[in-house]
Amino acid sequence: MTAETLLAVLGLLLAMAAGPAVALIFMLKRKRSARAARRSPLTENLLRLPGETLREQIDRVNEQADAWLATLIFFPMLIVCLHLGQSYVFGRGQTWPRVSVAALLAIGVAVVASRKLLVLSAQLDRLRLGLDGEVAIGQELGKVTRRGAAVFHDVPAEGFNIDHVVVATQGVFAVETKGFSKPQGNGGTHDATVVYDGQRLVFPHFTSSAPLEQAARNARWLSEWLTRATGSKVAVASIVALPGWFVDLKGRGDVGVYSGKQLAGLLDDRRASRLTEQQVRQIEYQIDQRCRTVRPTYRQEL
């Protein structure tokens, strides 16, 4: 391949890329002109949805996966093309050492990208399982709103979030959702039952007290923050919600444990402390302000 041929090929590639580039610039210009003529009717941010944090994490992991997938597809091809260009375009001839180095580099990149994609795939599975659980519990908590409760989702805290907060005259509840998968088996309800003895959760394939400890920490933080924000003592009941599981209560602990379907009776939990109507309004206002962080999509630039 001569230098003239190489320049011709490069010119053709640039010509092919020019069309999409011009179209993209034209589209962005028209979009900005349309935005300048109209504005969103929404003047404030929206409340956070169930699993808002998990959605953001899923978006970030998907972006990483796309980048590594592109690396897996195109980088080895680029290495081979560079080798061929060095060997033939510049007339240096093909030699086995250069082929070996190029091949090893391409294989190395493919291995690293593949391993990273496997890790990200497992991470996406966990995040999607958690998101499904939070959405399911968010829908179940809709039942308590019929009794006059207010429900907030994905409440931002200090370095973490509280999955759901329920506020009513019956009390304040901090609900931690745990979307645990079930084992593949034919045990019927046995494979789908978790035992709560007041101290720990006993699943068919593991035992843990970590969800209870996390729920207690979340409720403690929320109580301290609301007490400072409202100027009066606010007690918060800590709850763990296990969507899709049957809960077998063998004991009573400081943390309440509910299946998704049982949450309709959450307001009757005796761990909560009753509130006056004024306290409820104050607490709702403070949490509403903290959760109103989602920009309307119309106001977001492309």
Image (spheres, helix red, strand yellow):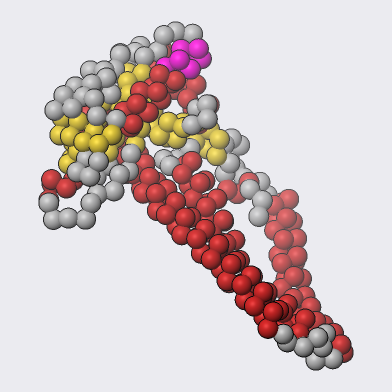
Q: In this view, does 19 lie above or below 129?
A: below
Is residue 146 found left or right of 76 in the rendered image? left
Residue 225 inside the magenta-drawn segment: yes
In the rendered view, tell whether residue 285 sits above or below residue 26: above
Q: Answer yes or no: is residue 217 visible.
A: yes
Residue 131 at what x, y percent from top left? 39, 46
Residue 192: x and y in percent read: 18, 46
Residue at (22%, 40%) from the top-left corner? 203
Q: Can residue 167 be seen in this view?
A: no
Residue 142, picture quadrant = top left
State the residue lying farthest toward the top: 232
Left or right placement of residue 274 versus residue 45 in this view: left
Position of residue 272 measured from the top left corner of the image (x, y, whole percent): 29, 17
Q: Is residue 76 magenta?
A: no
**Along the horizontal axis of the image, is 220 left or right of 253?**
right
Specify the principal SS of the magenta part: helix
Residue found at x 36% / y 49%: 129
Q: Which residue is located at x 73 percent, y 87 percent?
A: 94
Count every numbered label the image shows and give the total. Answer: 0
Looking at this view, name the residue that lies furthest to the right: 4
Q: Give 106 or 57, whichever is nearer the viewer.
A: 106
The quadrant of the picture occupied by the C terminus is bottom right
- Quarter placement of the N terminus: bottom right
Nearest the viewer among 5 and 233 is 5
Q: In this view, does 203 lie above or below 211?
A: below
In this picture, which residue range is highlighted in magenta? Answer: 223-230
Of 55 and 72, the residue lying toward us: 72
| Residue depicted at 63% across the width and 46% down the height | 299
Residue 202, horizontal then vertical, whole percent: 21, 36
- Judge by depth and name the residue closer to the eye, 236 or 293: 236
